[in-house]
Image (spheres, helix red, strand yellow):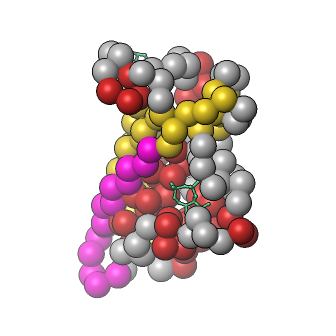
Amino acid sequence: MARGLPFRIGFGYDVHRLVPGRPLVLGGVRIPHPTGLLGHSDADVLVHALADALLGAAGLGDIGRHFPDSDPRYKDMAGFDLLVQVVEMVNGRGWVLGNADLTLVAEAPKVAPFIGAMTEELAVACRSTPERINVKATTTEGLGPAGRGEGMAAYAVALIVPAG
Ligand SMILES: Nc1ccn([C@@H]2O[C@H](COP(=O)(O)O)[C@@H](O)[C@H]2O)c(=O)n1
Ligand SMILES: C[C@@]1(CO)OP(=O)(O)OP(=O)(O)OC[C@H]1O
């Protein structure tokens, strides 16, 4: 148990722009939509927020530090694969996921039909179970950049607990 703490929490936040001609991948799930998120990777904003929450909980910085967008190895990297590597780092420090709670901010599309699949994917990447991961979505009622469909944001909190 790192420095005697019985658990640690972390917070993650990410934003990506929506553009035509890109696939929309959220929580590791491909979602049919006329626009997709722009990034050096697949720009899975939900996964990036969770990865940052896990890294923050473990005191390991953020995804930009471990997967710099100047590095061609991470070009088009799937968020799922990034999360798998982050979880390996966190597990390597003796921690496992306790639970995580995520919120996607998106005006469209309605992602409710995909929440179950996202939760399953995230649980696999986290070497955890779907009961420990909660995915939510909200619009901003048409307000701001997300409300105008210019992009999506995601927030995540994660609790990590000692392995075993
Ligand atoms: N992209 C989204 C946004 C929201 N939802 C679901 O719609 C419900 C109402 O959203 P509010 O903006 O009024 O908070 C909420 O229960 C969300 O789950 C969605 O599926 N996709
Ligand atoms: C994931 C990385 C690396 O491919 O690229 P992006 O898809 O641009 O994502 P971002 O959330 O801006 O930060 C981390 C990046 O280093």
What residue do we see at 31% from left, 66% from top? 8
144 and 92: which is toward the camera: 144
24 and 58: which is toward the camera: 24
Which residue lies most toward the bottom here?
A: 3
Q: Position of residue 113 (x, y in %)?
A: 59, 19
Q: Where on the picture, by quarter, is residue 58? A: bottom left
Q: Position of residue 98 (x, y in %)?
A: 41, 56
Which quadrant would the N terminus be assigned to in this image?
bottom left
What residue do we see at 35% from left, 81% from top? 2
Q: Where on the picture, by quarter, is residue 29? A: top right
Q: Position of residue 144 (x, y in %)?
A: 32, 27
Q: Is residue 5 magenta?
A: yes
What residue do we see at 70% from left, 36% from top? 22
Left/right of residue 94 with respect to residue 26 in the rendered view: left
Left/right of residue 130 with respect to residue 50 in the rendered view: right
Which corner quadrant of the figure contains ligand 1? Answer: top left
Number of numbered discs on residues: 0
Task: Please give the range of residues in magenta.
Answer: 2-15
Q: Position of residue 3 (x, y in %)?
A: 28, 84
Q: Is residue 42 magenta?
A: no
Q: Is residue 129 above or below residue 89?
A: above
Q: Where on the picture, by quarter, is residue 11? A: bottom left
Instruction: Residue 7: tell me if it is visible.
Output: yes
Instruction: Residue 116: tell me if it is visible.
Output: no
